[in-house]
Amino acid sequence: MPEALIRECIDGGWVPENDAELRLARRVAWVVDAVESRVTGDIDRALLGVGTADPAGRTLEDRIRIATACFDSGVSGQAGDLAALESDAMLTERPDLFIPAARAFAQISTERETSARIALSEQSLPYVFPGDVHPLMMDVLACGERILPALHVDWLRKLTAWLAPAVVVDSAAMGLWFWPVLDVLDIKKMSRELSKRIKRPAPRGARGIMAAYGTRLALPLDPGPHMEDRRIHALSVLGNIAG
């Protein structure tokens, strides 16, 4: 059972090992209470929801982590700062940086959202090499929950089928990029992709992320034998129950 697994981990001295665990743990009050004193880094504590972190003088990666923590807490940043954050992240060509940076900016910028809305209205899907993340995919993951509900159902199915393979990149990065948009994607297309991908070899944590997505889609998926995957899945289940 998820609660028994997490309690066993806590009794064994577990400290959240990655941002995904911190972000999922923050949704479960008793887990936060149990591990708060063990989490010492200011950014880690911000992601857990028990502190704040100053982005001044930080690396690009740390500034993106802080922006993510702020938005998880419902705190908005300055549009200019977040626009620059996305621009800087795009130069790295690293989706683990530019996707969360784009999302941070899109959450407060109507201009950024409008740009995504226009791109998604064109109903044109380019070929994307496996493992790549196209700018249109970034638009969906940045603010799709506010755009996709207005799309025609046939276009949404095609868009979901085109976007869904990016879950491999997301899960490998343990980015939780799909988490905010799962409810507005085509459930059948997304479930089919997750059911297929979770059976393939993946880095530690990736199967846990995919299984966590399954909990949001009423899709039972096995996170596998590794404890990191099982913890991520269990935290998602407990967070869903906590609401």
Image (cartoon, rainbow, N blue to C red):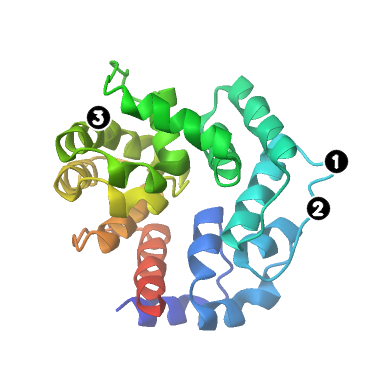
Q: Which mark is residue 57?
A: 1
| Residue shown at 73% from the left, 36% from the top | 80
Reading the chain from its start, which is encountered first: label 3 or label 2? 2
Instruction: Pinpoint residue 96: horizontal percent, then vertical percent.
Output: 52, 36
Residue at disc 1, secondary structure: loop
| Residue shown at 41% from the left, 33% from the top | 117
Residue at disc 2, secondary structure: loop
Q: CA distance from mark 1 to mark 3?
A: 38 Å
Amino acid at dot 1: Gly
Q: CA distance from mark 3 to mark 2?
A: 38 Å
Cβ–Cβ under 8 Å for marks 1 and 3: no
| Residue shown at 70% from the left, 30% from the top | 84
Amino acid at dot 3: Trp
Nearer-the-camera pick, 156 or 53: 156
Counting other residues with Cα less than 10 Å from the Cα at mark 1, is it few (<14), some (14-19), or many (20 or more)? Answer: few
Q: Is residue 66 left or right of residue 160?
A: right
Disc 1 or disc 3, which is closer to the eye? 3
The answer to whether residue 58 is above or below residue 241 is: above
| Residue shown at 21% from the left, 58% from the top | 221
Return the residue at label 3.
162
Nearer-the-camera pick, 243 or 144: 144
Residue at disc 3, secondary structure: helix
In which image quadrant can residue 15 be found?
Answer: bottom right
Counting other residues with Cα less than 10 Å from the Cα at mark 3, is it few (<14), some (14-19), or many (20 or more)? Answer: some
Instruction: Pinpoint residue 235: horizontal percent, then vertical percent.
Output: 41, 69
Return the residue at label 2.
54
The answer to whether residue 238 is above or below residue 153 is: below
Cβ–Cβ under 8 Å for marks 2 and 1: yes
Cβ–Cβ under 8 Å for marks 3 and 2: no
Q: Is residue 217 left or right of residue 100?
A: left
Reading the chain from its start, which is encountered first: label 1 or label 3? 1
